[in-house]
Image: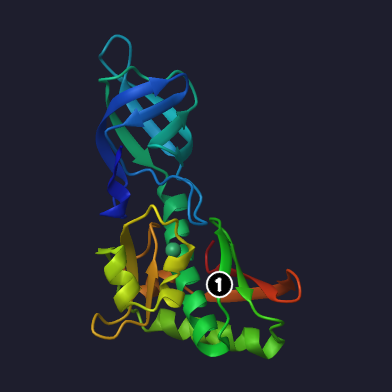
Amino acid sequence: MTEQRYLADSTVREFEATVERSLDDRVVLDGTHFYPTGGGQPNDTGTLRVPDADGDGEATLAVVDVEKTDTVYHRVDGAAPPAGTAVRGVVDWDRRYAHMRYHTAQHLLSAVLLEEFDARTVGNQLYADRARLDADYPKFSETDLADVETRMNGLVDDALPVRHYTMDRADAEAELDTERTRIDLLPSSITELRIVEVGDADDPFDRTACAGTHVGTTDEVGEVTVVGRTTQGSETERLTFTLAGT
Ligand SMILES: [Zn+2]
């Protein structure tokens, strides 16, 4: 399995790696900072720089898709370099950083909805310019939406720290609020969890089991606008929000 280096450090934009396998236009590296689609967060894009044929320069291959199945596959626009090739990966940072801001904002929104409306998050999808979240709730009013927006912007202004760590699943199920962490949504094959925590270490505002990439403090999220709501059936509401500058 490719070492998923973005789990340990989501701030790295450029990295060195070695091709382990290549299949037509797909490349498997020994380690990567490219995030593969998952958990409502889209894949990273960017480039792989490889030595060109005569060895005195670099050729650039666009990374157009990244997916994780048995390992992480980078789909490139062109022929994949052979096994053993040393490459330099460059992540499209504008896109990735927008995903990080939206992902942290989504955790804040999920926590606010649970705390204030007892509304559980049942789905989410983020993009580089907007995000949506589905919650178990009959119907939010305009006042509710304004309150949620105010609350989220307060949490952004508080510049709360965001950190992550791994935890044994059995320990997490015993010690954490499983509804909040949404551990119950994860397949039983996952025995070690990555926990993303927002707020003070001794009394965190939110803890969620998550393999996504996040900003370091909530002020990086920027100003939140709750755009609106639509119904997804009598018990589910879909909220859409945007972040300043995206
Ligand atoms: Zn998450």
Query: Would you place residue 243 above or below residue 59 in this image?
Result: below
Identify the image quadrant of residue 186. bottom left
Q: Nearer the viewer, residue 157 or 21?
A: 21
Q: Nearer the viewer, residue 28 or 51?
A: 28
Identify the image quadrant of residue 122. bottom right
Residue visible at 60% across and 70% down in the picture: 241
Farthest residue in the top direction?
A: 54
Residue visible at 33% across and 36% down in the picture: 89
Residue occupied by mark 1: 121
Residue visible at 37% across and 62% down in the picture: 214
Whether residue 79 is visible to the viewer of this picture, yes or no, is: yes
Q: Nearer the viewer, residue 160 or 112?
A: 112
Image quadrant, ligand 1: bottom left
Whether residue 163 is visible to the viewer of this picture, yes or no, is: no
**Quadrant placement of the C terminus:** bottom right
Residue visible at 44% across and 39% down in the picture: 69
Q: Position of residue 24 (x, y in %)?
A: 47, 18
Q: Position of residue 92 (x, y in %)?
A: 42, 44
**Amino acid at circle 1:** Thr
Q: Nearer the viewer, residue 227 or 172?
A: 172
Q: Position of residue 51 (x, y in %)?
A: 29, 19
Q: Is residue 111 left or right of residue 201?
A: right
Q: Is residue 119 left or right of residue 157?
A: right
**Quadrant placement of the N terminus:** top left
